[in-house]
């Protein structure tokens, strides 16, 4: 297994807080590339659109606006807490703007079956996926997403998933743990960390909490004092992606979503990890080669300096969009 081909992007797991990105009751999560995504989707009143990663509903609120009046918005999230948090604001917005709102707890890998179950025979004009974690997930101590709070090492976005990150670290071999950290976290010292994790297990003290893992990574990497990026960031990101099967879900979504678009419709994906962006780039390239789709932008879109300053979490964001040609016949 070689080194990841792209230069590592700063991991997204632990954004450094600034006033603008600081969660507040009104803005528990600051949406990334809000104007660029809306511009690419080109939603019109009466259209059907899908926000495949609802989160705090920031992008969804803007999409609702563009669909008014008479449109329909389907919002998905694997995390029931995200849906419940976004629901009141989106429901009152939807009612005020005469837009039909459907919120479903689902992984976007199931987009096809959710559309068939709830909106049979209708094809979305726009589908958006804003990948990764939300600030609410990182900031809720009990979720075990962050080393800033000591909590059981969970990292599941969907609490129905059978295995937590702690389960994974108990079950995988040293080599498997190292591979996860290297490939999903781009952690160059993955072997040292894996050795310490397995050694703790051998001594009868398997890693069970976020605090224990953070401490163990520090010791494995012999870190002292302050670092710009916390030394455990890559390890947490890798475990989160493994626990939630994030790359597999993305692959399934990228295979299914373009076919569900209405002719002229657009699929947009914001990613925060080079492994994710590689998959998006490759999938869109293959779709464009069929002659039925075209890439919306010549090259990947990145946040402006101004957005990066206001919302440091946006720094590693990459946005790509794919449009189904107007004259492409809908799949039967
Ligand atoms: C970056 S946040 C989205 C923020 C949202 N766009 C906003 O403006 O508030 C990502 C959300 O996607 C959800 N998520 C991640 N992977 C998912 C998947 N495979 N299917 C559905 N939701 C997913 C997470 O639970 C999280 O709430």
Image: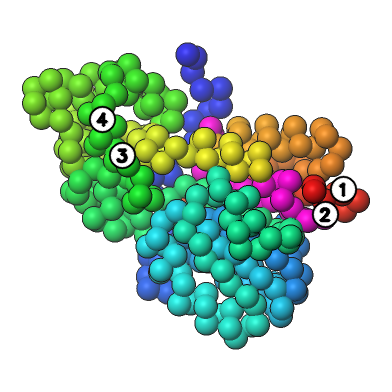
Q: Which residue is outermost to the top?
A: 1
Which comes before the other along the chain, label 1 or label 4?
4
Disc 3 beta carbon < 8 A from ligand 1? no
Sequence-wise, the earlier of marks 2 and 3 is 3
> Is residue 63 among the parts visible in the rendering?
yes
Identify the mark at residue 328; answer none if there is no mark: 1
Q: What distance separates the C-alpha of mark 1 from that of mark 4?
A: 47 Å
- Position of residue 122 measured from the top left corner of the image (x, y, whole percent): 73, 61
Q: Which residue is mark 2?
A: 263
Q: Are marks 1 and 2 in contact (CB under 8 Å)?
A: yes
The answer for how far apart the CA atoms under marks 3 and 1 are is 42 Å
SS at mark 1? loop
Classify residue 41 as left or right of residue 86: right
Q: Any magenta on residue 261? A: yes
Secondary structure under the numbered disc 3 in the rendered image = loop
How crowded pointer 2 is (Cα within 10 Å; few <14, some 14-19, many 20+) is rated as many
Instruction: Say whether marks 1 and 4 touch (CB < 8 Å).
Output: no
Please tell me the numbered disc located at residue 163: 3
How far, Cα to Cα, is label 2 from label 3?
40 Å
Q: Residue at x 52, y 66 (%)?
A: 103
> Magenta stretch?
257-275
Residue 329 sits above or below residue 51 on the image: above
Whether residue 187 can be seen here: no
- Vertical placement of residue 285 versus 33, above or below: above
């Amino acid at each position: 297994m070689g080194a990841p081909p792209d230069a590592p992007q700063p991991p997204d797991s632990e954004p450094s807080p600034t006033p603008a990105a600081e969660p507040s009751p009104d803005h528990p999560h600051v949406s990334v590339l809000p104007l660029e995504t809306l511009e690419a989707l080109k939603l019109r009143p009466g259209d059907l659109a899908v926000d495949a990663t609802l989160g705090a509903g920031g992008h969804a609120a803007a999409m609702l606006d563009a669909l008014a009046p008479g449109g329909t918005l389907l919002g998905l999230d694997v995390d029931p807490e995200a849906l419940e948090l976004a629901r009141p604001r989106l429901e009152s917005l939807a009612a005020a703007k005469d837009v039909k709102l459907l919120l479903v707890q689902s992984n976007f890998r199931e987009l096809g079956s959710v559309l068939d179950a709830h909106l049979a025979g209708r094809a979305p004009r726009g589908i958006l996926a804003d990948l990764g974690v939300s600030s609410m997930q990182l900031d809720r101590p009990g979720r075990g997403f962050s080393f800033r709070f000591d909590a059981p090492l969970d990292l599941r976005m969907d609490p129905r998933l059978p295995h937590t990150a702690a389960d994974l670290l108990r079950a995988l071999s040293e080599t498997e743990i190292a591979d996860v950290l290297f490939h999903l976290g781009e952690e160059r010292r993955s072997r040292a960390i894996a050795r310490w994790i397995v050694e703790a297990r051998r001594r009868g003290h398997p890693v069970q909490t976020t605090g224990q893992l953070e401490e163990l990574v520090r010791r494995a990497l012999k870190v002292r004092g302050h670092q710009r990026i916390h030394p455990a960031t890559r390890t947490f990101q890798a475990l989160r992606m493994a626990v939630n099967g994030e790359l597999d879900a993305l692959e399934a979504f990228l295979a299914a979503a373009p076919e569900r678009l209405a002719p002229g419709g657009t699929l947009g994906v914001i990613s925060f990890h080079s492994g994710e962006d590689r998959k998006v780039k490759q999938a869109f390239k293959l779709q464009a080669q069929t002659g039925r789709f075209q890439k919306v932008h010549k090259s990947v879109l990145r946040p402006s300096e101004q957005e990066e300053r206001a919302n440091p979490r946006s720094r590693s964001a990459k946005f790509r969009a794919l449009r189904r040609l107007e004259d492409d016949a809908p799949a039967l």
